[in-house]
Image (cartoon, rainbow, N blue to C red):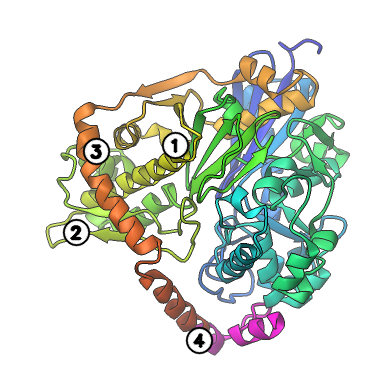
Amino acid sequence: MGDLTNSYVVGVDYGTLSGRAVVVRVSDGKELGSGVFEYPHAVVSDSLPGTGRRLPADWALQVPNDYRDVLRNAVPAAVADAGINPENVVGIATDFTACTMVPTTADGTPLNELEEFADRPHAFVKLWRHHAAQPQADRINQLAAERGESWLPRYGGLISSEWEFAKGLQLLEEDPGVYAAMDHWVEAADWIVWQLCGNYVRNACTAGYKGIYQDGKYPSQDFLAALNPGFKDFVSEKLEHTIGRLGDAAGYLTEEAAAWTGLPAGIAVAVGNVDAHVSAPAANSVEPGQLVAIMGTSTCHVMNGDVLREVPGMCGVVDGGIVDGLWGYEAGQSGVGDIFGWFTRNGVPPEYHRAAAAQGQSIHEYLTALAAEQEIGEHGLIALDWHSGNRSVLVDHELSGVVVGQTLATKPEDIYRALLEATAFGTRTIVEAFRDSGVPVKEFIVAGGLLKNKFLMQVYADATGLQLSTIGSDQGPALGSAIHAAVAAGKYKDIREAAAAMAAEPGAVYTPIPENVAAYEDLYQEYRTLHDYFGRGTNNVMHRLKAIQRTARDKQRHAAAPASGVASTAEAERVSA
């Protein structure tokens, strides 16, 4: 295995708004330097770059060259910050948001980079939170249930609009020209690895969780044809490819990628992975029952199990989805930090922002301090954390946010605290689904940017009744990627061994306060009442409002300037007929 002390690896974490690189020592996992690069185009949800064309509701796109720019900027910055000789770097690994999809040509060129498709929305990257494929997801779920497809229970009975098949079907039905020109429908996690090493390898994680790959196969050609005759060959012509095991090398750094990053050509490039799943080794939480919640713009909950169980509303259970030899379970919440950020941008008056600045605080810090002064329930509110839909356990992105109990006396800090608490209740709902399905949560570990909010962490401990521990790293996903890079470079035999040596030290521990647990129980029961009323078919007002919104936005968009490549409802129905 060579000299581990003088060997280094680079982990690159691709988030929703930026990419973060970290340089890690192989021998002990010490983080020596880091770099961050904000995506210039961020999330494209209003209008297409360079065209001004408005996008329909629930669209979320990205520009793939922003991802290359992370390699050109964040990686060299991390190496410089570490002060190491780049010649001693032995491997690089990346993780990505999922399911984030890139339509490409045969050589990996994103279709939006071709002149003829530069103004076609469907030629761009569809970010994980692109939720406009909900109608396609509904049809996939209905048909799979009717046919009794064996793979459906592995996903809790529902396939998400965020995933590969729903987004691919939307592409076919709304822009057949782009679909026909597309040679590969690629997870961004695999596309960036392709850029680094020149090899296209699908990773086992996204193939299983987002690509409906179970027991060695995808949904059948017959099933796909029943969805839409033009979708019959989706797997064989657009999706199917070599699947790589997590921790293996997908290839070796090309000369071009070496020039981007400043790293030596020929070093190992690990098979791609997902930002959540790759974080479990960073927390050394790779044994059954250790639930890791990666809390950022959204939250993903991952846990290993030694038994296969069908858990309602889960994002999937995959053999070896996190580490070899165990079943990897995934659940999640589509909006967490995104919700808090939305509220501070749109629901907080200027005087609060001025007061925060005067105290040298961010608006989040300022509101958190005010909220922390309250007694539990003092604000008189209960909220549903569905501003970006519900990933688990309802798997429905037509759902939307709710705040109940507002009066003329309600203040911004009241709503802010109610939103914090709502996300904690959403996590408790997931924990209970695991428990009730025979996959109990034994430990609760938090990684990601939100672990810095100590008040929020205590709320989660009190609302769930679980002791909560955090990892001692601000770069959990990037560290997890670095651990995979060390394995891909042959420095450790497997992920378990590498995690034991390189995982972050434990961070803060939050113990539930008994009187707070009791107080939150009453609020949680109100949350569950609203959860089931709006989310389980008792009242479909949210779906009706989405339909009204979609119709109104389409009218406005087409009246202004019909967007090339986004079909009208009538055209979509014609194509799918």
Question: What is the three-letter code of the residue carrying label 1?
Answer: Arg
Tell me which label, 1 or 4, sits earlier in the chain.
1
In-image side of 556 versus 365 (left or right): right
> Taken as a whole, is the magenta stretch helix, strand or loop?
helix
Tell me which label, 3 or 4, sits earlier in the chain.
3
- Disc 2: which residue: 405
In-image side of 280 versus 371 (left or right): right
How far is the residue under mark 1 from the one under mark 4? Answer: 46 Å
Compared with 316, 548 (above or below) is below
Q: Residue furthest bottom?
A: 559
Tell me which label, 4 or 2, sits earlier in the chain.
2
Compared with 240, 504 (above or below) is above
Which residue is located at x 80 percent, y 22 percent?
87
Residue 555: which disc? 4
Report crowding for label 3: few under 14, some 14 to 19, many 20 or more residues within 10 A (C-alpha): few
Residue 435: which disc? 1
Residue 369: which disc? 3
Which image quarter: residue 62?
A: bottom right
How far is the residue under mark 2 from the one under mark 1? Answer: 31 Å
How far is the residue under mark 1 from the one under mark 3? Answer: 33 Å
How far is the residue under mark 3 from the one under mark 4? Answer: 44 Å
Q: Residue 537 or 562: which is nearer the viewer?
A: 537
Q: Nearer the viewer, mark 3 or mark 2?
A: 2
Find the magenta span and give its range. 555-577
Instruction: Say if the magenta span includes residue 576.
Output: yes
Which image quarter: residue 508?
A: top left
